[in-house]
Image (spheres, helix red, strand yellow):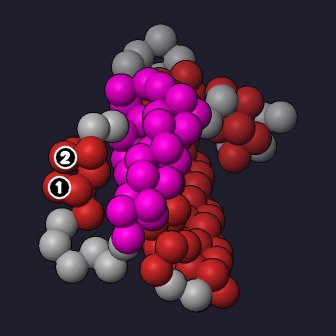
Amino acid sequence: MQRHEMEAWLGDDHGLTEEQITELMRTADEIGERYPDPDDQEDRDAALFAAYELMVRDPDEVIAEQAGRIEQGRTLERRGLAGARQTVITLEARGELDPRGTLNESSLARTFGVDRMTVRGWLGKR
């Protein structure tokens, strides 16, 4: 990351010293190596923001916020899986799953981001 990119990312009133900006740039490079895939931009941004936050805020607050985000994500995943499971069960009960059609266990597994055996388990076939 170039210095002007870092300064643009930080914006005005960031509260960092020149040394801290240099340190954050090094951290950004390390983060870039950890998340090299172009699709990982959101992960890089989240990691860089956490590094910045640790420079300007109380670490206990930053830790608590990160823990809250993780818990929130787990809750959303749990709810999503519960809804996906019920969708599969309901479609099966209505006879709308067709092993040879486009709406089948494999297609639903791909769509929901789970393996086929998970879908089969939801249906009591495992």
Q: Which stretch is magenta?
A: 17-46
Determine whether the residue tagged by mark 1 lies in a helix, strand or loop.
Answer: helix
In depth, the one of 25 and 111 nearer the eye is 25
Q: Quadrant of residue 37?
A: top left
Asked if the residue under mark 1 is in contact with the one under mark 2, i.e. CB atoms within 8 Å, the reply is yes
Residue in the picture at 51% in, 73% down: 55
Say few, some or many: other residues with alpha carbon within 10 Å of mark 2 (under 14 / 14 to 19 / 20 or more). Answer: few
Where residue 4 is drawn, which disc sits there? 2
Q: Position of residue 113 (x, y in %)?
A: 54, 36
Which amino acid type is shown beneath numbered disc 1?
A: Ala
Where residue 66 is drawn, which disc sits there? none
Residue in the picture at 42% in, 36% down: 40
Position of residue 75 relative to residue 4, above or below, is: below
Left or right for 111, reference 75: left
Mark whose residue sits in front, 2 or 1: 2
Where residue 8 is drawn, which disc sits there? 1
Say few, some or many: other residues with alpha carbon within 10 Å of mark 1 (under 14 / 14 to 19 / 20 or more). Answer: few
Which amino acid type is shown beneath numbered disc 2?
A: His
Q: Position of residue 46 (x, y in %)?
A: 44, 56
Position of residue 112 relative to residue 12, above or below, is: above
Determine whether the residue tagged by mark 2 lies in a helix, strand or loop.
Answer: helix
- Residue sticking out furthest to the right: 126
Main structural element of the magenta stretch: helix, strand or loop? Answer: helix
In depth, the one of 11 and 89 nearer the eye is 11
Label 2 – label 1 distance at C-alpha:
6 Å
Left or right for 119, reference 87: right
Position of residue 42 relative to residue 65, above or below, is: above
Q: Position of residue 52 (x, y in %)?
A: 45, 66
Quadrant of the drawing holding the C terminus: top right
Q: Is residue 24 magenta?
A: yes
